[in-house]
Image (spheres, helix red, strand yellow):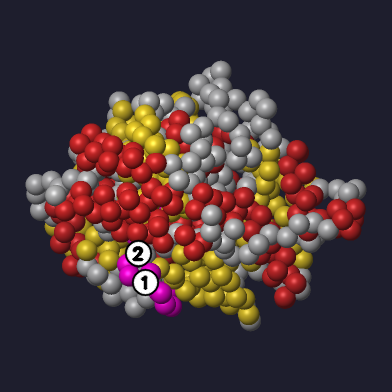
Amino acid sequence: MTSAMTTILVFVEESNGTPRRASLECLSAARATGMTVAAIVAGPGSEKAAAHVGKYGATKVVALVGAARWSSDAVARDVAAVARELSATAFLAAATATGKDIAPRVAALLDSTLLSDCTGVTADSGALVATRPWLAGKAIAKVRSTAPVFCATTRPNVFPATEAAGTAEIVTRNASSDGQAVVTSVAEKVGGKLDVKEASIVVSGGRGLRGPENFHLIEALAAAFGSAATGASRAVVDAGWRPHGEQVGQTGKTVSPSLYVAVGISGAIQHLAGMRTSKIIVAINKDADAPIFKIADYGLVGDAFEVLPVLTKAIEAAKKH
Amino acid sequence: MKIVACIKRVPTTEAQAKVGADAKSLDSTGWQYMASFYDEIAVEAAIQAKEKHGGDITVLTIGPSEAAKEVREFLARGADTGVILKDADPGSRDPRWTAKALAAKIGSLGPDIVFTGRVATDRDNAAVGPMLATYLGWACVTEVVALELADGRGTAKRETEYGVETVEFALPAVITCNKGLNEPRRASLKGIMAVKTKTIAEEAPHDSLAQAVIVAVELPPARKAGRIVGEGVAGVAALVDALKNEAKIL
């Protein structure tokens, strides 16, 4: 089933004509199965983005063109139609806000179940097996699918995005225009602030920061690292100190950055579940017995107000060399 | 306005994971249960829609009879009817199975709008809402943080990694609710007393063949033991050195 003769279709998101990184990771995950990779790109810059997609192992790229406005249900119908035309036996999308909106609809249209937010997709004796976290990562399940099409989404920041030799045949396809739910406007994040799910470095603050007025210390450290996002514990989000979108944990976002810095976060089980798959974890906390130190690679016992300004300067200096 | 709120009974977020004897499930010994966190927001959205537009709310769940506890709590808060699609084996279901069972029941109820949480905090699929809408042929907006309904239409806002989208749609529709949409209320004492003896209907769910086959369940690999690099400001240099020379992050 997973031979090079069978096709795996990947849904690719774009931003201003560039494929989004999470989609490139998803393409790499698809290529690693050994199947023939096809891609479908949706969005206003789909044609331009399609030209980049061949560099990531797709041999055929379909660009959906001519949609006046975004409609996830219309895009899903087009994606499912292409999956049927290519006789795809597998379908992947990144588990981003858009991918999670599209993939379940595509799966339903193909009368196939969906395996969400996978941290692994491997070919094993002729069948695909997905690895996916349960209970926000407290347990890991390996799951096969008997569906007509193996449908899954891949967690951002887990799979490497690697280029491959080869070029793709690019075709355009007129997008369906009969959306039931239509995006009429998008308020872009100011200053292109990174989301915790996509950032390769996340600096999170907790109750140890004592008040919302002190989160400039977290933001300054994130800025010193460069492309870092700011995160927060549930306690400070519930207290209204930080926006909901920054919450890391079981009832927030589950993240896997290269570096996760937890400042003034004690490490409740719900928070640990949401960030324990980070590659490197740094904990800064006044309480040497805080549970966060048990899963941290590097712990610094100290007061955030004393440590953060010095650490921020030291990171800035280290980045210069 | 006819409203349905779909909820799921899940282990509390304090629940510890322990692999079951078959190595394909989790041992639920000692677990406490609750309605999934985001389903609380879904029910609150349903109650607010009823307060504004009138109508009635059916709280619908798939699960064991014990889910009556969670359903009753939502009746006490302001929902009108509770239905449990009784499933003795929820652990073996997949999102398609669940969406099909819900679609069969919701199709017969004929609501104007269905609210559910953006994700259930046990299997973390975040798939049932949009799959359900697709099987019903209805509009769907996921991860909603703001909602206005008027004259058979709706406007919703949803947060993405790069900004906030405004989405317009016609009813009937399925809305999956995200944190930020509202603050769920508590049940009043009067509400709790009023629903104490209310019967919650149990029905057999529409059954189909589950497609997801669990091969194995494991605990996540233990993290390599870390170390305390130092204390206070004096430890900063050691931390930066470790990030630069060991972790090679900088």
Residue A99 x, y percent position in the rendering? 39, 56
Magenta span: A183-198
Label 2 to label 1: alpha-carbon separation: 6 Å
Q: Is residue A193 magenta?
A: yes
- Do the residues bearing badges 2 and 1 touch, measured as CB atoms within 8 Å? yes
- Chain letter for mark 1, please: A
Please report the residue visible at 87 percent of the width from the left and 56 percent of the height from the top: B189
Query: For residue A175, what is the image quadrant?
Result: bottom left
Please report the residue visible at 64 percent of the width from the left and 59 percent of the height from the top: B42
- For disc 1, the marked residue is A190
Q: A47 or A74, which lies in front?
A: A47
Secondary element under disc 1, as helix, strand or loop, is: helix
**Amino acid at circle 1:** Val
Secondary element under disc 2, as helix, strand or loop, is: loop
Q: B128 or B75, which lies in front?
A: B75
- For disc 2, the marked residue is A193
Dot 2: within a 10 Å radius of its alpha carbon, few (fewer than 14), some, or many (20 or more) residues? some
Q: B17 or B198, which lies in front?
A: B17
